[in-house]
């Protein structure tokens, strides 16, 4: 009986089965493997030991008293052929039939592309990060980033994650374009929507130009302040300053420059500048100085105008009086010069002898001032005397009464300047 009890378990028909729950799982879901023994009713109550296998590889390193084996999150790579073994006594091992477990992968869905920093406009030189994400999908996912509608591939990454990143360290103006990404975990790529990226260039230091209608601005002139940034992405907002006080602003939606106009006054003299800003940092221009000239008529006050008017009236009267006096004197002078009763000088003119003349007896001329009518007019009387020729030897001299004075030589010369008369007298004296 003792021998029968020892040999009975070895002779008992026993079946071993491996069951998976669920039988065809999907990725990222838990799976339980159960090794079940089916024995006759009178079988031994000995506690069996279990081991589990996949594709001839043990899943546990040694025998275990647990008839279950847990896979917390099954993956596509966990697909394969499974079985288990059980042992009740030392010398007998039971093996279950194999079964094929195929792990299903969850297809990718809801692929999206985001950027950091957020927004579609960046400044030149900024770092740009593209983040490609999937809402659902299991296993290793291959992410791809594309540029432009033609699909220029920029980067490819494969990783066991629902998100992946691609980075451009410093964007440039030519990086302005449309971008999208794709994700694939074996069921075919899924595409994200398009994201437009615009790389904007900060404004450079603007240049202020002041335009006036003449070389020197005058009060009342129309003045144009023109401000323009040589480089900068639109739209650009310009502000105009006078002595650091804002005069006004103007925008350039499409780029370029902008103007501000005003009518100049004396208070507008001073320093001007402008500022350009397109949201990526404001830049200030150099200072330009403009001074306004105030016209003379604008600076006279009423009292001064009356005084000047009175002086001009008095000056006019004085000029009329002077002209009348000048006219009266000239008229008087002409009458005196032609007066027949005017008395000639009584002393007889002296006689002069020209030393260089071979004949000492010649016509003698004398010039004498008669009257000064005006300060720059001199009337002179010029007359000549013929000297009688001395009788020759043996001739009888004519009586004194025979000397006749030539009245035809008397002339009156007028309107000689003093300096000219003096020169004539000096020559006659020689």
Image (spheres, grey):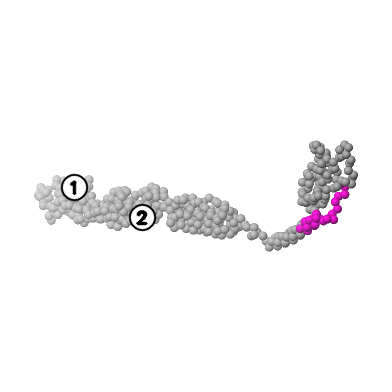
Q: At x 52% / y 56%, what residue is drawn?
A: 225
Give coordinates of residue 201: x percent, y percent: 43, 51
N-terminal of the pair, mark 2 or mark 1, is 1
Q: Within 10 angstroms of label 2, few (less than 14), some, or many (20 or more) residues?
A: some
Label drawn at residue 193: none
Q: Start and end of the magenta stretch? A: 327-348
Cα distance between the residues tagged 2 and 1: 50 Å
Left-right relation of 382 to 205? right
Horizontal and vertical percent position of residue 57: 20, 46
Pair 2/1: label in front: 2
Residue 365 highlighted magenta (yes or no): no
10 Å crowding of disc 1: few (<14), some (14-19), many (20+): few
Residue identified by numbered label 1? 55
Report the side of 341 relative to 213 (left or right): right
In the rendered image, which residue does mark 2 sit on?
A: 196
Relative to residue 93, is residue 346 drawn left or right?
right
Q: What residue appears at the point 80 percent right and 38 percent down from the top-left corner? A: 357
Relative depth, front residue between 405 and 217? 405
For residue 333: magenta? yes
Q: Residue at x 51, y 52 (%)?
A: 208
Q: Can residue 358 be spotted in the picture?
A: yes
């Amino acid at each position: 009986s003792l021998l029968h009890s020892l040999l009975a378990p070895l002779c008992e028909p026993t079946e071993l089965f491996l069951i998976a729950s669920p039988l065809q799982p999907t990725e990222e879901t838990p799976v339980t493997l159960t090794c079940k023994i089916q024995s006759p009713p009178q079988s031994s109550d000995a506690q069996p030991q279990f081991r589990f296998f996949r594709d001839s590889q043990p899943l546990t390193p040694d025998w275990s008293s647990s008839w279950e084996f847990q896979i917390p999150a099954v993956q596509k790579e966990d697909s394969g052929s499974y079985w288990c073994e059980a042992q009740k006594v030392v010398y007998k091992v039971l093996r279950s039939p194999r079964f094929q477990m195929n792990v299903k992968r969850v297809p990718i869905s809801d692929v999206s592309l985001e950027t950091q920093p957020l927004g579609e406009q960046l400044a030149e030189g900024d770092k740009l990060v593209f983040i490609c994400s999937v809402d659902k999908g299991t296993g290793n996912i291959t992410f791809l980033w594309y540029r432009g509608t033609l699909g220029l591939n920029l980067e490819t990454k494969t990783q066991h994650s629902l998100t992946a990143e691609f980075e451009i360290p410093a964007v440039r103006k030519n990086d302005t374009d449309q971008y999208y990404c794709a994700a694939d975990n074996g069921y075919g790529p899924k595409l994200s929507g398009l994201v437009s990226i615009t790389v904007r260039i900060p404004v450079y230091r603007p240049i202020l130009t002041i335009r006036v209608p003449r070389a020197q601005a005058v009060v009342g002139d129309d003045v144009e302040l023109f401000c323009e940034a040589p480089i900068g992405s639109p739209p650009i907002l310009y502000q105009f300053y006078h002595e650091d006080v804002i005069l006004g602003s103007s925008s350039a939606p499409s780029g370029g420059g902008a103007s501000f106009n005003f009518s100049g006054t004396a208070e507008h003299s001073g320093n001007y500048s402008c500022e350009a800003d397109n949201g990526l940092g404001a830049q200030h221009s150099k200072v330009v100085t403009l001074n306004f000239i105030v016209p003379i008529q604008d600076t006279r006050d009423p009292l001064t105008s009356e005084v000047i008017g009175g002086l001009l009236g008095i000056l006019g009267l004085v000029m009329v009086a002077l002209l009348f006096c000048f006219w009266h004197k000239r008229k008087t002078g002409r009458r005196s010069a032609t007066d027949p009763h005017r008395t000639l000088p009584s002393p007889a003119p002296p006689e002069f002898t020209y030393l260089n003349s071979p004949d000492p007896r010649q016509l003698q001329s004398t010039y004498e001032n008669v009257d000064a009518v005006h300060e720059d007019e001199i009337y002179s009387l010029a007359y000549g005397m013929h000297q009688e020729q001395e009788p020759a030897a043996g001739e009888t001299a004519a009586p004194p009464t025979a000397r006749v004075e030539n009245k035809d030589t008397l002339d009156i010369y007028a309107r000689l300047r003093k300096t000219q008369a003096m020169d004539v007298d000096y020559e006659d004296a020689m």
